[in-house]
Amino acid sequence: MRNSIVVFAFAFLGAAVLCAGCSRKPSSVTPARTTTGAAGGATVSGASSLVYARDIRDRLSRLPRTPIDYDHALLDEKETQTVHKLIDASRFMNDIFLRQVAEKNPQLRSRVAAAARNDVAARWALALFDVHKGPWDRLKENEPFIGTEKKPPGAGFYPTDMKKEEFESWVSSHPADKEAFQGLFTVIRRQGPGLVAIPYSKVYRDALEPAAKHLREAAAATGNASLRDYLTKRADAFFSDDYFASDLAWMDLDSDIEVVIGPYEVYEDALFNYKASFQSFVTVRDKAESEKLSVYAKHLPDMERNLPIPDEHKNLKRKFESPIRVVQEIYTAGDARRGVQTSAFNLPNDEKVREAKGSKKVLLKNVMDAKFRQSGGPIAQRTLVQAEIPNISFDAYFNHTLFHELSHGLGPGIIRGPDGKRIEARLLLKEIYSTIEECKADVTGLWNILFAMDRKWLSGFQEPQLYATYTGLMFRGMRFGIDEAHGQGTAIQWNWFREKNAIVPEAGGRFSTDRARFREAIRSLANELLMIEATGDYARGKTLLEKYGRSNAEIQSVIARLSDIPVDITPAFVGAGEQ
């Protein structure tokens, strides 16, 4: 396996600098010299005085460059032309996201790219920079691999020297600023002795203007009225910072081209989880696969009623419109294309849109297939006892991904805060929200699969296959980094299920599952996570993370045995000209 990883890594360098999405200019290099330094122990440095971690090639091998193509027969010539305009618009999401990760990123990347012309170490560093969208390794708790500077917890959304206490003190003493400061679509900057919120439309206008131009060109090119409506409204939203109307239009989108572009996820803001990052997914709908799954959306009200929490906390007034799309990925950009790649997404995140319209679940089947073949399946085979290996199932993995996304749209959303006013649970849970929400979606996804199995809505695999596949793939999630929302959420589950003896250690560092205990362990953890969100109880959430969201000797021992298996993939989109 290691040989194929190394081959992928060297192939990666041949085109990654051009295609990874942070730049549209290629670089070529020649060898550099080796020294010792801070980042990653031994380091490599070139004449530019930049210092790089010596193990960059090994880090690249953990995310091997993997060609991702789609069935071109799904689109006609006119639609294909529209897709290319959407790809052109999407490239600017890379430029914005790079600045959202760190304001200094564009300048640093330019320095590394210049050094890469004559320095092979810089060339490797540039490739890894483009994978992680910055000089910090997302698989190693954001350890720097270029230089020694730590990543600011507030990324590029806040002044790098600003502490949480300063922000909260400002909002407390300037209540008129609260909405703008906590808003999804502003950055916080210093202004004299104080702080100020600046809208995205102003901060990123240089990239939003050409992106909007390409969106309008795509709108003019398409023959689909719903796609034209969405693209036109989204282009307008770039300059108003009001995404509500275009999110509603996206929910109504009925097109073979499934695209979403704009600011959505809040993971990058590790300070508060307040600020949304720009991203883009350009995909093509697989109608036949989508129709197979549409039945589940009809049962969302039943799933809400079945949640293991008191009725007073169930969100039965929320709209349960929930289109499900199975798609093939054509191109991604920005926050959708950094480090570990997503298998699916559930948008919009805005609770006002969810209450008015629901949310849409999009499963990226060609990406899921590549991830399962390259890392998920091999990890499960190495961590389960021999008797459970036949139970490893792509269908179980695929359906849990679906039910994970369905479950994002279930449970508490806007709740009663301590002052009796309605508020999003996200705002009360602050920086722990993303971990709690991802963990909730995982666990309630399992709970809802069991519910669907019990009622014969779901077939194709059985309970033992669900538990074996899920247990085997948990180490895949923890290898993403337990400081990251998905990885820490998985650690919570692993430690909880181990404590409840749903997962049992066996000889040789392998594990078996206890079917009788697994269902109750799922129920109890789902209850804990849902109640944290229902009450907005930050202290309770922190206690859960501190007790269960940690690595331990057992986890580390298993992960050490997986070092020759890729952690994930780095996509090379054939349809976008990335060879």
Image (cartoon, rainbow, N blue to C red):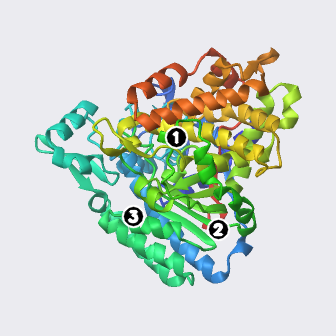
Q: Residues within 10 Å of mark 2 (few under 14, many from 20)?
A: many
**Mark 3 or mark 2: which comes first in sequence?**
3
- Rendered position, 258 above or below 166: below
**Mark 2 or mark 1: which comes first in sequence?**
2
Q: Percent position (x, y) of residue 94?
A: 46, 57
Label 1, label 3: how far apart the Cα atoms are: 29 Å
Q: Which residue is mark 2?
A: 284
Please state the total of marks drawn on the protein image: 3
Question: Does the rendering let one see residue 144?
Answer: no
The reply to whether the C-beta atoms of the residues labelled 2 and 1 are less than 8 Å apart is no
Label 2, label 1: how far apart the Cα atoms are: 39 Å
- Residue sitting nearer the eye, 358 or 218: 358
Give the residue type that dot 2 points to: Val
Label 3, label 2: how far apart the Cα atoms are: 24 Å
- Labelled disc at residue 244: 3
**Mark 1 or mark 3: which comes first in sequence?**
3
Q: Which residue is mark 1?
A: 311
Q: The N terminus lies in which quarter of the figure?
A: top right
Which residue sits at x=49%, y=25%?
A: 545
Asked where in the image residue 563 lies, by quadrant, the reply is top right
Q: Residue furthest front?
A: 311
Q: Residues within 10 Å of mark 1 (few under 14, many from 20)?
A: few
Which residue sits at x=50%, y=67%?
A: 250
Asked where in the image residue 120 lies, by quadrant, the reply is top right
Which residue sits at x=30%, y=62%?
A: 201
